[in-house]
Structure formats: C-alpha cells, structure tokens
Amino acid sequence: MSTKEQNNRYNGDATSRPSCTDKKDENVSNTLMVEHGLPDDIHTEITISFATCLFTQEFCELEGLLSDDVKMISYKKRTIKGKDEFVQYWKWLSDVLKADQIITDYSVKYNALSGHAIVACNQKSVFGSVVGEAYVFLHLENGKISIAIITPKQLQPRMVRYYDQDTPPLDYDKIMHQKNEIISPEPHRMPCLNCGRLSDELEWYKLEIDSGPYSHIGQVSVCPYCKKQIEFYPEFFIRKQ
Ligand SMILES: [Zn+2]
C-alpha cells in the first residue's frame, strides 16, 4: 500500500499500550479540513470525531467512539480486533509518521464509493512532496465504530490506469450478468460497509468492465445480502483502439 505503514511493521505487543496521558505533540503541523455539504447524519458526526482524534493525537478519546468488538483492517495486511489494539494501532502509526517527519493533512470528505463521509489522509514530507494518500472508511453499529479500514486511495498499480476509491460502485445486476469465474475470497480487503460482512464473507469473481475505448479486467467482490459492489480491483488495462 502507498501509506507509510507499508514500510514499517506494526508491533501488536500489548505491553506498549498507549497511555491516556498522551498529549498532542505541538511540534506536529498536521492539518484537518472538513468538507462543506456533507450528509447530516451520524456517520458524518462520528467520522469528524474520529478525524479530530487523529489530528489532535488525543488517542484515548478514540475509545468512546468504538464498539467493544471493533476491528481495524489495514488493507491487504492484517485485521486487528479490540478497543485497546485499535487505539494502539493509531498511536503506533502516528509515532512512525512523526519519526519520519511526515506531515498528514486530514480531510473529512464525501466518498462516492461508500456513499458516506470518509477520512482522507494526505501524507507529505516537510518539503511538501506527497509520500502517500490513504483513505479511512468506517462502518458503524448502534452509533459506534465497529469496523475501520485504511486503504491506499488507489488500490492497483498506476500502470493499470487510474481507478480510485472515489469511483462510484458498479451496478450490481450488471456485475452479476457479466461476471466470469468465481475466485477465492481474501481476508483484509474492503468489507461491506453497509452490513459489516468482512471481505472473506463476500462473493468474489473475475470481471471485465468495458469503458468504451478501453477495458479493465480484474477482481470484484460483492455483498450478496446488500446486493452491492464492494471492491473492484483492476489487474489489467486493455486499450481496444
Ligand atoms: Zn452487505
């Protein structure tokens, strides 16, 4: 993935649990921006609270936003379970970024794939060059975060052509009509943000999407319960003309 996490191994050692006395590091010049016109719903409210915790580095404030069995998914890497581990993950990531002098611009913005507010994280060096673009998607249950997933903004290599996590989902009926062979579900991928089923509980297929002068061949996951596309991961780009 394109975030700094890729190059730094997460140490899930519970002995390094963050202390509730951790305070904001005044030397870090991270920023937080909230887009205008977001949906007026609990999802937006919780997403802003979550982004504020990351920005202020008041990690212990996170706990009140989490359900008891919360899961933190790092795309294609791992799934961490539990409140303490969730908080510890974000504290660890913050420490890694600080050690590498990476500044993060957080923005809460509307996302067309999920239909909700998400947290976009633009990571840049002190010289201003972008070093990573990550998105954090949340799934809520009873007004609490039950799943968070951090993904790169764009999942596939750029040579496959730009196809990012802002792209609206493909039509479910069209996918089911055009799908090719079934493929094995993978863990640590996008969950259904509607019902909370994890990626290995979804249906996966090979799929070719025709986009006029070119097409993409890749993997698609769908939630058969919510009848939605969850993730489309193009593996090949084909120019037809
Ligand atoms: Zn679902």
Image (cartoon, grey):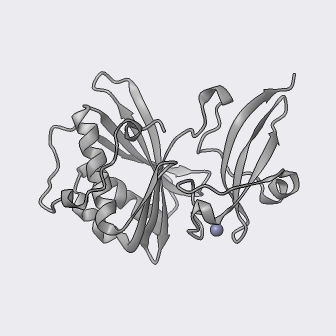
Q: Tell me if 28 is positioned left or right of 216 in this view.
A: left
Tell me if residue 207 comes above or below residue 101 in the rendering. below
Q: Tell me if 184 is positioned left or right of 21 in this view.
A: right
Q: Residue at x 46, y 64 (%)?
A: 147
Residue 167 x/y as whole percent: 65, 44
Quadrant, the C terminus: top right
Residue 120 x/y as whole percent: 45, 45
Tell me if residue 193 comes above or below residue 10 in the rendering. below
Residue 223 x/y as whole percent: 69, 64
Q: Tell me if 134 is positioned left or right of 111 in this view.
A: left
Residue at the far left: name it.
Answer: 21
> Is any atom of residue 29 visible in this view?
no
Tell me if residue 144 comes above or below residue 178 in the rendering. below
Q: Quadrant of residue 163?
A: top right
Number of numbered callouts drawn: 0
Q: Quadrant of ligand 1?
A: bottom right
Q: Residue at x 38, y 23 (%)?
A: 129
Tell me if residue 45 comes above or below residue 233 in the rendering. below
> Is any atom of residue 19 visible in this view?
yes
Q: Quadrant of residue 217?
A: top right
Residue 8 x/y as whole percent: 34, 39
Q: Residue at x 79, y 28 (%)?
A: 238
Q: Residue at x 25, y 64 (%)?
A: 61
Residue at the far bottom: name it.
Answer: 142
